[in-house]
């Protein structure tokens, strides 16, 4: 019996939230989860949008790479 494991080398994940604190918690939870499969944060990009009602909306893209 032959086992072969292929490691993920790159992974891009998208996050969204209504406030910055929630967005940060989501990203931190995913960082911990990806650390178990040997991926570290390579880059983070984020944006904030204000709609016509004045409500803010936050998004982020996190690029994970193999350590």
Image: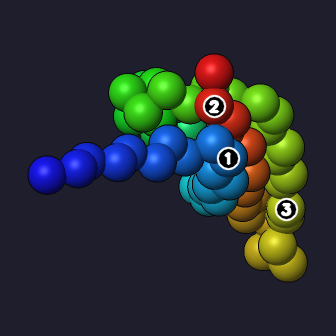
Contact between marks 1 and 3 (CB within 8 A): the answer is no
The residues bearing labels 3 and 2 have C-alpha atoms spaced at a distance of 31 Å
Question: Which mark, residue 10?
Answer: 1
Name the image quarter holding residue 50.
bottom right
Q: Is residue 26 left or right of residue 59?
A: left
Q: Which of marks 1 and 3 is nearer the N terminus?
A: 1
Question: Which mark, residue 30?
Answer: none
Looking at the image, residue 18 lies above or below residue 7: below
Looking at the image, residue 35 lies above or below residue 56: above
List x then y, in percent, for residue 40: 62, 26
Contact between marks 2 and 1 (CB within 8 A): the answer is yes
Q: If the image is split into quadrants, where does the C terminus sit? A: top right
List x then y, in percent, for residue 21: 57, 34
Question: Which mark, residue 66?
Answer: 2
Q: Which residue is drawn at 46% across and 48% down?
A: 6
Name the image quarter holding residue 42.
top right
Q: Which residue is drawn at 23% across and 50% down?
A: 2
**SS at mark 1 in the image:** strand
Residue closest to the eye, 31 or 8: 8
Q: Which residue is drawn at 63% across and 42% down?
A: 9
Tell me if mark 3 has few (under 14), some (14-19) or many (20+) residues whose alpha carbon lies within 10 angstroms of its own. few
From this viewpoint, is residue 63 visible?
A: yes
List x then y, in percent, for residue 56: 75, 58
Q: Which residue position holds label 3?
A: 49
**SS at mark 2 in the image:** strand
Q: Which of marks 3 and 2 is nearer the N terminus?
A: 3
């Amino acid at each position: 019996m032959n086992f072969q494991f292929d490691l993920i080398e790159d992974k891009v994940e998208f996050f969204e939230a209504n406030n910055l604190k929630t967005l940060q918690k989501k990203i931190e939870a995913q960082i911990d989860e990806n650390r178990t499969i040997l991926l570290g944060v390579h880059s983070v990009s984020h944006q904030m949008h204000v709609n016509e009602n004045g409500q803010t909306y936050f998004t982020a893209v996190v690029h994970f790479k193999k350590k």
